[in-house]
Amino acid sequence: MIYPAIGDLMEKFKSRYSLVIGVAKRAREIYQTGVTFTECKSSKPVTVAVNEIAENKVSFKETAERDEIISDEEVYNKILEESMRN
């Protein structure tokens, strides 16, 4: 049996997509910092992230969805602004 079960994880998220995004973001944090909040047999960041979420050691803030469509020009401007900051 797979632990934690997908059904248990889905109770914490609205969709599978948001679950995958949450796990990926947490796994990236673990990979970059090495900080974990749970004991796990595996040292793989994705496995550790899934276990942390199942054990309620981390939480995620839901962001508001945008109803309007963003134009290509707005996207390019945001990319330029971000690249100028770095």
Image: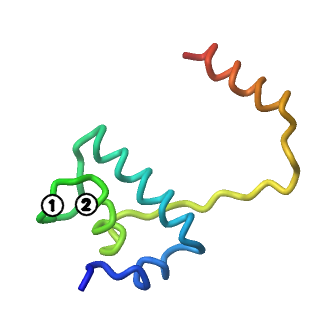
Q: Position of residue 45 (x, y in %)?
A: 27, 52
Query: Residue 37 or 43: which is nearer the viewer?
Result: 43
Taking the spot 22% from the left edge, 54% from the top edge, the residue there is: 44
Mark 2, residues whose alpha carbon is within 10 Å: few (<14), some, or many (≥20)?
many
Q: Badge 1 local density, few (<14 within 10 Å), some, or many (20+)?
A: few
Marks 2/1: CA–CA distance: 7 Å
For disc 2, the marked residue is: 48
**Residue closer to the observer: 77 or 63:** 77
Q: Determine contact: label 2, label 1, CB under 8 Å.
A: yes
| Location of residue 23 with respect to 8 vertically, above or below | above
Q: Position of residue 21 (x, y in %)?
A: 50, 57
Sequence-first disc among 2 and 1: 1
Disc 2, SS: helix
Please say if 54 is above or below 26: below
Task: Identify which residue is drawn at 87% across, 36% down.
Answer: 71
* Disc number for residue 73: none
Q: Position of residue 5 (x, y in %)?
A: 34, 82
> What amino acid is at disc 1?
Ser
Answer with left or right where residue 85 lies relative to residue 60.
right
Work out which residue is located at the far front of the displayed protein and give it. 1
Q: Mark 1 = which residue? A: 42
Q: Is residue 12 left or right of residue 54?
A: right
